[in-house]
Image (cartoon, rainbow, N blue to C red):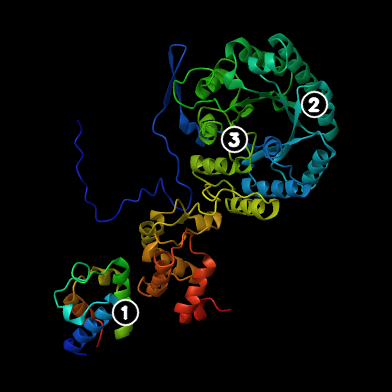
Amino acid sequence: MKNYELKDVPTPNLLEDMFPYSLPPLIEFEGTIHEWIDGKNVEFDPADVRTRDIHITDTTFRDGQQARPPYSKEQMVRLFEMMSRLGGPQGVIRQSEFFLYTKNDRETIDACRALNLRFPEITGWIRANKGDFRLVKEMGLKETGMLTSSSDYHIFHKQNQTRKQAMDQYVEVVEAAFEAGVRPRCHLEDVTRADLPGFVFPFVQKLERLSEQVPDHMKVKIRLCDTMGFGLSYPNAAEPRSIPKLIWRLRNEIGISPDRLEWHGHNDFHKVHINGASAWIYGLDALNSTLFGFGERTGNPPLEGAVMEYVALKGALNGVDLSVITELAQYYEKVIGTQLSSNYPFVGKDFNTTRAGIHAGGLRKFEQIYNIFDTAALLNRPPRVAITDKSGSDGVALWVNEYLGLKGDERLTVMKVAKIFRWVMDQYEKDGRMSSITDQELEEQVKQQLPEYYNKYKKN
Amino acid sequence: MDKSEIKSRVEKVTALVLKVDPKDISPTANFAFDLGADSMQSIELIAAYEEEFNISMDEQKAREVQTVEGAVEFIAGYVK
């Protein structure tokens, strides 16, 4: 047993190297990760993400639109512009993929192009069908995704094909892409439920042989589609569900570089974000995502979560403007009319709102106790308290001070807000109220009970 | 202001806020245990002392005062 001695220190150790507050908490690693593959111990160095060009790709307008009413052209252009600002000039949000099938799809691409933004680059999405390839050529895109389903569930039961027929069809479309000078990105649909050595790896090896004929910027990219959310990030999970093993084999046995590998997840088992982040850590560069995770059924990796993870892994913003996440959420709610759940991380109405009086007391004394990072500076969202009978005098004082914008010694004590606190408690104890006190009601109380402060700080 | 006046005014305010009979208020009476003040009333009591004596007290220290005589001593430190 190891003996741990209490270290009574004169000043607190706030672990600020890991929790800088001016950034989301940093993700740091100690040592390598061990995975057991074919009876051998294989090592991954997770700190490698600091130096690799990990980035985010977007499918808000493709997978994201499959799960909701379509966006208008104007909405898509506005979202595209905001994504560009969010990802910044280094292209942390590197690409965005679009449908090409309708006139509206194609006009939207033209309108996004007209913005002349460097990032995200626009790519297409088609079925693995030579006929569909005409659309990519007409739009003049440099890269397109194509559906290359990889499990027998899809090949046998959806496509009514044999594995050879499926592979021949996919290869034919890839060759057509090369001929047209368009980079193919093969979406290995349902890969976490596929026969990896019996179909996926032979297919990818075939693609690698085809790629030998083209320059680097044209080589086939591989998107690993965890279509049903079956992927597992746990060390030593069995194949085909193991994300570490899948990435390791593609990189080490087939020789695909990380810049040509991408993860696309689904949230059927609540694993969507961590699986995506783990895919980065286990050695691929591109994480495919959608704004607020909207996507088929349970959705895709949330793009804003991926951006936050990127900053935490890199330990720097690298041009990312996190405040655009707040703008995007407001746009969804006010213009698109999509309400985000109030407890949704980073954007929900209550993501940094506390109702508990004891938490409010902590917030009043030292904001960092109950705020995840400087949400006011990074997201334009200062921490808030929502007032109920559980908020306590500290909660009321915090609300009033935030409302009046008082800082430091100017801040009112709980004694100064005692009458408002009494009014709040009477709402519940005498009137049997069941709902939270609204901001408007509290503003009225400040006017009535603290007129000198209201007149000084809020009037005009 | 002398301490007897402070004591008299503290007792008056305490009786009013906690709705207790002034004769039950002894110098050693504990606000919570003897006079039944809950956490909300404790805040209201301190707020009422501030209003009565026209002073602003240190919140943390004021909340640590537990008895009537403790309140008299504490307030005496603020009034001239």
CA gap between label 2 and label 3 equals: 35 Å
- Mark 3, Cα crowd under 10 Å, few <14 / some 14-19 / many 20+, is some
Can see residue A397?
no
Residue A112: x and y in percent read 77, 45
* Left or right, residue A89 beside residue A182: left
Read off the chain for label 3: A
Crowd band around label 2 with a 10 angstrom C-alpha radius: few (<14), some (14–19), many (20+): some
Q: Which mark is residue A298?
A: 3
Above or below, A416 relative to A27: below
The amino acid beneath tag 2 is Gly
**Vertically, is A318 above or below A405?**
above
- Looking at the picture, how far across and down is residue B18, in whole percent? 27, 75
- Asked whether the residues under the numbered discs 1 and 3 touch, taking CB atoms below 8 Å apart as contact, a structural biologist would say no
Chain letter of the residue carrying label 1: B
- For the residues beneath circles 1 and 3, the answer to whether they share a chain is no
How many angstroms separate mark 1 from mark 3 (CA)?
55 Å
- Residue A437 placement (x, y as % from top left): 48, 64
Sort mark 1 into few (<14), some (14-19) or many (20+) by Cα contacts within 10 Å. many
The image quadrant where one finds the N terminus of chain A is top left
CA distance separating discs 2 and 1:
81 Å
Element under label 1?
helix
Residue B48 got which mark? 1
Give the label, 2 or 1, closer to the camera: 1
Disc assigned to residue A181 = 2
Q: Chain of mark 2?
A: A
Q: Choose between A182 and A67: the one closer to the eye.
A: A67
Which residue is depicted at the point 86% across and 32% down?
A: A138
Q: Can the viewer see residue B18?
A: yes
Amino acid under disc 3: Thr
Q: Residue at x 81, y 30 (%)?
A: A136
